Amino acid sequence: MIGCGALARELAVVVRALPNVDVTCLRPDLHNRPERIVPAVREAIAAARPTYGDRIFVAYADCGTGGLLDQLLDGEGVERLPGAHCYEFYAGARAFAAVADEEPGTFYLTDFLIRNFDRLVWRGLGLDRHPELLDAYFGNYRRVVYLGQTEDPALVVQAHSAAARLGLTFEHRHVGLGDLATAVHAFAGSIT
């Protein structure tokens, strides 16, 4: 399995009971640079082919590649996680659509993004150096929805603080691993 580094903790939990699945995670900073995902996944597939042949699964959603990841995977005969992004497969497609329909101006956070908020969002977008960019980046957002994978009160506090820093209202929904676990278990079942 070739996974997004932003899913490393969750993938480790899911595959713990699956001895026939090896996981290689790509750099989590690709999360902020979707144009680099397809070349990195292509390279990882090429590296995995001699050992795993056709038994490769990609633990990424589309993740902002605009369908380019699917084009690569179709050509390689490799499946991936369902959905447009991790928010959708964590929440489940129907539940995510309902949350998005409630308020299109929603900024989503996961456990990974909360743990790395300062690095990936605050400093990653340059808000530490240019706070005047806050409105340019987040002016059209109305709320933060933290889609929690774990029930960690400290992460909820951090998520609430992140929402306050962004000047947005806050909502927490515990979603667990959602369709991530389902898709990984289906893949594991197909290779046994």
Image: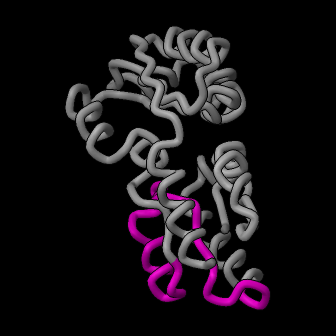
Span colored in magenta: 49-78
Q: Nearer the viewer, residue 68 or 12?
A: 12
Q: Is residue 130 visible?
A: yes
Write the residue at 21% across / 27% down. 102
| Image position of 166 (left or right of 7) | left
Q: Is residue 29 visible?
A: no
**Location of residue 19 with respect to 116 vertically, above or below:** below
Estimate the x, y position of residue 155 in percent, counting from the top left. Answer: 63, 18
Image quarter hosting the N terminus:
bottom right
Write the residue at 39% across / 11% down. 169
Number of marks in picture = 0
Estimate the x, y position of residue 192 in percent, counting from the top left. Answer: 63, 78
| Image position of 7 (left or right of 186) | right
Q: Nearer the viewer, residue 180 or 191?
A: 191
**Location of residue 31 with respect to 53 vertically, above or below:** above
Estimate the x, y position of residue 162 in percent, counting from the top left. Answer: 57, 16
Q: For residue 91, which quarter of the picture?
A: top left
Write the residue at 32% across / 26% down. 140
Write the residue at 45% across / 11% down. 167
Q: Is residue 102 a member of the stretch shown in magenta?
A: no
Estimate the x, y position of residue 7 in percent, counting from the top left. Answer: 64, 48
Colouring used for the render: one colour
| Image position of 177 (left or right of 99) | right
Q: Nearer the viewer, residue 128 or 87?
A: 87
**Location of residue 182 with respect to 94 vertically, above or below:** below
Q: For residue 92, which quarter of the picture?
A: top left
Q: Is residue 50 a member of the stretch shown in magenta?
A: yes
**Location of residue 8 with respect to 154 vertically, above or below:** below
